[in-house]
Image (spheres, grey):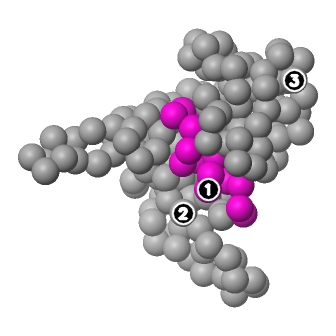
């Protein structure tokens, strides 16, 4: 498992993402607040995730404005969980629930929280997970691989034009 964590972080950084490690859920929440302060964020969009309620309470205590619905587009930072992380590509697999896909794509900064147990080695494993979930109910998934990037006509890469300029993943032990 630890080799998957190392590879995930290496591949995430290779695609211009950033990773931080947290020793516990509480440590992860502290890291989120530190990231928000460092980026001078004021507004935060929060997607459903296992730590959402605790995170919401901590953000309200710290006087951050939480936005939802159409207001997600004006958030400084979006925070989500992920169903899986894929070590071979540094990607996150996020279930489309009507909120998570907006939170991962609209704010200029995306922070994702994952547990080490959610990291799989290959895309094939991620696809198998999706297949199993689709057998139970129709749904959509999206892969997030680093910050948004595109290229102009001269193939000069540009980051953050069609989505977040920054992706930070907090990997929780």
* Cβ atoms under marks 2 and 3 closer than 8 Å: no
Distance Cα–Cα, label 2 vs label 1: 8 Å
Visible residue check, residue 63: yes
Q: Residues within 10 Å of mark 2 (few under 14, many from 20)?
A: some
Q: Residue at x 79, y 32 (%)?
A: 66
Q: Which residue is mark 3?
A: 60
The image shows residue 77 at horizontal and vertical percentages of 62, 31
**Can you tell which mark lies on residue 124?**
none
Mark 3 secondary-structure assignment = helix
Q: Residue at x 79, y 26 (%)?
A: 65
Q: Residue at x 67, y 76 (%)?
A: 139
* Cβ atoms under marks 2 and 1 closer than 8 Å: yes
Q: Residues within 10 Å of mark 3 (few under 14, many from 20)?
A: few
Mark 2 secondary-structure assignment = strand
Q: Is residue 100 magenta?
A: yes
Q: Residue at x 76, y 37 (%)?
A: 67
Answer above or below: position of 153 versus 37: below
Q: For the residues carrying marks 2 and 1, which lies nearer the camera in this image?
A: 1
Q: Residues within 10 Å of mark 1 (few under 14, many from 20)?
A: some
Visible residue check, residue 115: no
Q: In the picture, which quadrant includes the C terminus? A: top right
**Can you tell which mark lies on residue 101?**
1
Q: Nearer the viewer, residue 173 or 40?
A: 40
Lower sequence index among marks 2 and 1: 1
Distance Cα–Cα, label 3 vs label 1: 23 Å
Q: Nearer the viewer, residue 132 or 36?
A: 36
Q: Which residue is mark 2?
A: 142
The image shows residue 10 at horizontal and vertical percentages of 39, 38
Q: Is residue 104 magenta?
A: yes
Lower sequence index among marks 3 and 1: 3
Taking the image as shown, residue 152 lies to the left or right of residue 41, namely left
The segment highlighted magenta reads 97-117
């Amino acid at each position: 498992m630890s080799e998957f964590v190392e590879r995930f972080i290496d591949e995430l950084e290779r695609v211009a993402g950033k990773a931080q490690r947290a020793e516990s859920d509480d440590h992860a929440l502290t890291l989120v607040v530190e990231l928000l302060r460092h980026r001078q964020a004021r507004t935060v969009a929060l997607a459903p995730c296992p730590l959402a309620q605790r995170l919401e309470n901590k953000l309200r205590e710290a006087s951050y404005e939480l936005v939802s619905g159409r207001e997600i587009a004006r958030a400084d930072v979006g925070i989500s969980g992920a169903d899986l992380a894929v070590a071979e590509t540094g990607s996150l697999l996020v279930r489309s629930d009507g909120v998570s896909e907006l939170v991962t794509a609209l704010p200029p900064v995306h922070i994702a929280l994952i547990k080490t147990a959610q990291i799989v080695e290959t895309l094939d494993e991620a696809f198998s997970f999706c297949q199993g979930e689709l057998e139970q109910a129709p749904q959509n998934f999206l892969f997030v691989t680093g910050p948004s990037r595109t290229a102009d006509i001269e193939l000069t890469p540009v980051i953050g034009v069609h989505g977040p300029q920054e992706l930070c993943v907090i990997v929780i032990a």
